[in-house]
Image (cartoon, rainbow, N blue to C red):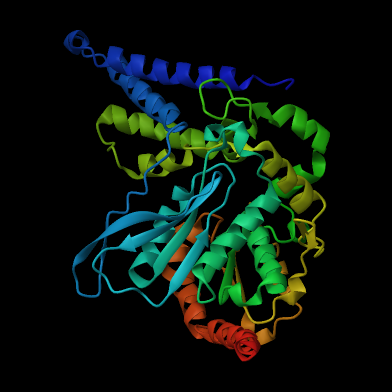
Amino acid sequence: MRYLATYDLMETVRNTNQWLGATAQAIGEYPMFALAPNPMFKMLSAWGEVTERSFARMVAKPDWGIYTVVGADGRDHVVNVKKVIERPFGDLIHFEVAGRKTKERKILIVAPMSGHYATLLRSTVASLLPDAEVYITDWHNARDIPVSKGKFDIEDYTLYVVDFMKELGPDTNVVAVCQPAPLVLAATAYLADIDPEAQPQTLTLIGGPIDPDAAATDVTDFGDRVTMGYLEKTAIQRVGFKYAGVGRSVYPGLLQLTSFMTMNAEKHAKAFSDQIMAVARGEAGDHDKHNKFYDEYLAVMDMTAEFYLTTVERIFKEREIAKNEFVVAGRKVDIGKITDVAVMTVEGSKDDISAPGQCLAALDLCTGLPDEKKNHHLEDGAGHYGIFAGKSWRNNIRPFVLNFMDQHAGEHAAQASKKKAAKTKPALKAV
């Protein structure tokens, strides 16, 4: 690649900053300097602590950290993370609650593959766990996947979601957060064509770019402004020798993180300067608000080059989902074929990534769906993060989503059961 540092050089810069932070902290905390009551040493140590922690988190996959959940009996039940399906580029995992009767609600959360791990939705999972059996897609870091495992683009992503839906059955409630919303909509339409009985009973799309042109943001403006050739030359790198995916073309998580940070540079700069002062004063904690947020925010993962480039080209530039022209494995997907899956869209009025109107476009595409199976919620004052993990989610959106699921519970599953029985009857008569 040209114009940017190589993958190994970027990792070297990150590693050097981590080392500088650790060194500064060690020097600032050297016992001898305690004899000199100079605040410079406390500031040096505080800067080092914050710097070392920040750069170390960039290459660490966070733990789910969900250990127990309170059951209806008032007891704490242990939560075990179980893999239901294992694939090279992502797994389907289940948060199994030990000693608790299986919940009737079954929820599949489709996590975004946009630079962060699925653990970004930890609070979303934790909020739903007391009331449902929760499953989630756990996408893998492309740097750790050998080249021998092949490619992974948006069509492969869609087919993964199709297989996960099939595994869980027609009584599943699917929730797609941000980036996967258009692909999950396409996966449902794909099933409506090839295996309608395997579709989920409800589909909730939260802050996703179904039609990026419906409302302009910095993200959509970037997609319109940059050519694919320029993007491939400047953003794509090959994984270095340190990782199992050596040689694989990826869009590095560190580049994505840089994009995230520059979008709100002043806000992030103030947050880190405030944290350094808090550490120097002895007021910071290992799990304080700053560390809790940035430990997750700074933990980034690489995306395969083909996934990143096809997302930009086919979702944002060509708008294949918005135009109902998306093709998966040679089969054209017709979103109008979704006829009995209840669909709801959720947006935040202050969302600066997927602005209001982008996700709502999904309902217009569902031409075969009756109005009583469509719903929309616009959360006033909520930003992008808030609509799936913040106060707005906890207080308003979550209850709204659960009510929507309950309202349509059993409808599609009952129809799927009847259709399946009708298909098997002729076979039985023939026997």
Which residue appears at 56% of the width and 66% of the height?
165
Near-viewer residue (350 or 210): 210
Residue 10 found in image quarter? top right
Residue 211 found in image quarter? bottom right
x, y (%) of residue 311?
71, 48
Task: Determine if residue 351 is in view.
Answer: no
Near-viewer residue (86 or 12): 86
Near-viewer residue (386 or 68): 68
Instruction: Please identify the quadrant where the C terminus is shown.
Output: bottom right
x, y (%) of residue 87?
53, 48
Outermost residue, bottom direction? 429
Which residue appears at 39% of the width and 19% of the height?
21
Above or below, comparing residue 151 to residue 230 in the picture: below
Horizontally, residue 253 falls left or right of residue 96, namely right
Outermost residue, front direction? 431
Instruction: Please identify the quadrant where the N terminus is shown.
Output: top right
